[in-house]
């Protein structure tokens, strides 16, 4: 069964509260989102394996450690997932970035695919799928299926705010995938928006409200 990790470090909680406030403008919203993505990325990469390397400091030779094995891929779900990429790339500058384009049909709230471009060797990488909002879970479930169809088998899903409905949907459809979120909110409203949530993440990032 997949595990739900709620990363409620005080810095993350504080920054998320600023983002939730409707008075917060796009510039600050984007900055906070990237800062939280970096803080969450720190936890999400905690189990990356290390290997020994021989180096020389100015004082002596030593056996040091470096991250070993598989490389990372960061895959945002467009549009809003883009808002978390810079923060993660600051942590892992060599990570490759793929893009999955999905939008929610305004009537049915089901996701519609419009773009998919992934690193050629994505199946050999540890994939961090990112999207700030996990509402019904439709977008995350479809993106995870697309990644698995490309051969990916080491995937973690990172969001900012999750609804219980979305967590349930991902855990049922993809029981092998761990979910990392900064907050688990109360519910969805009749428009499938997260309550209390933070509104439309894509619109607040790109100023398209
Ligand atoms: C939002 C959000 C997620 C999706 C979550 O994207 O960024 O991708 O909705 O909802 P779900 O869990 O019910 O699928 P949206 O479709 O609004 O597109 P955008 O990012 O381009 O604004
Ligand atoms: N997408 C958003 O951007 N916000 C929500 O609350 C739900 C879906």
Image (tube, grey):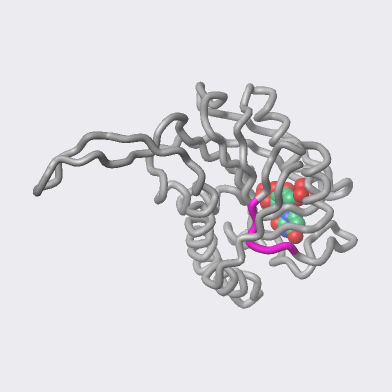
In the image, which residues are magenta? 180-184
Compared with residue 130, is residue 187 higher up or lower down, i.e. above or below?
below
Residue 190 placed where, x, y %? 90, 61
Compared with residue 120, is residue 77 higher up or lower down, i.e. above or below?
below
Magenta stretch: includes residue 110: no
Q: Residue at x 62, y 77 (%)?
A: 23
Residue 25 placed where, x, y %? 56, 71
Q: Residue at x 9, y 49 (%)?
A: 59
Residue 164 placed where, x, y %? 81, 57
Q: Residue at x 64, y 32 (%)?
A: 115
Residue ranking furthest to the left? 59
Q: Predominant secondary structure in magenta?
A: strand
Residue 202 makes an appearance in the image: no
Residue 97 makes an appearance in the image: yes
Compared with residue 9, is residue 120 higher up or lower down, i.e. above or below?
above
In this orientation, which residue lies closer to the viewer: 162 or 48? 48
Q: Quadrant of the N terminus?
A: top right
Q: Quadrant of the C terminus?
A: bottom right
Left or right of 96 in this view: 60: left
- Counting labels gives 0
Compared with residue 125, is residue 183 higher up or lower down, i.e. above or below?
below
Left or right of 5 in this view: 168: right
């Amino acid at each position: 069964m997949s595990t739900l990790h709620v990363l409620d470090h005080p810095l993350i909680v504080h920054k998320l509260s600023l983002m939730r406030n409707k008075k917060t403008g796009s510039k600050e919203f984007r900055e906070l989102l990237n800062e939280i993505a970096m803080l969450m990325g720190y936890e999400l990469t905690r189990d990356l394996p290390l290997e020994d390397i021989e180096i020389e400091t100015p004082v002596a030779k030593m056996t040091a450690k470096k991250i070993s094995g598989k490389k990372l891929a960061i895959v945002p779900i467009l549009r809003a997932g883009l808002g978390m990429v810079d923060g993660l790339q600051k942590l892992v500058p060599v990570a490759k970035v793929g893009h999955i384009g999905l939008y929610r049909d305004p009537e049915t709230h089901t996701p519609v695919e419009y773009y998919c471009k992934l690193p050629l060797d994505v199946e050999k990488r540890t994939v961090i799928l990112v999207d700030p909002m996990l509402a019904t879970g439709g977008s995350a479930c479809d993106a995870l299926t697309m990644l698995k169809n490309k051969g990916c088998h080491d995937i973690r899903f990172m969001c900012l705010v999750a609804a219980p409905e979305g967590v349930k949907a991902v855990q049922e459809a993809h029981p092998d995938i761990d979910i990392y979120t900064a907050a688990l909110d109360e519910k969805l409203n009749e428009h499938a928006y997260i309550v209390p949530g933070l509104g439309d993440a894509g619109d607040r990032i790109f100023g398209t409200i």
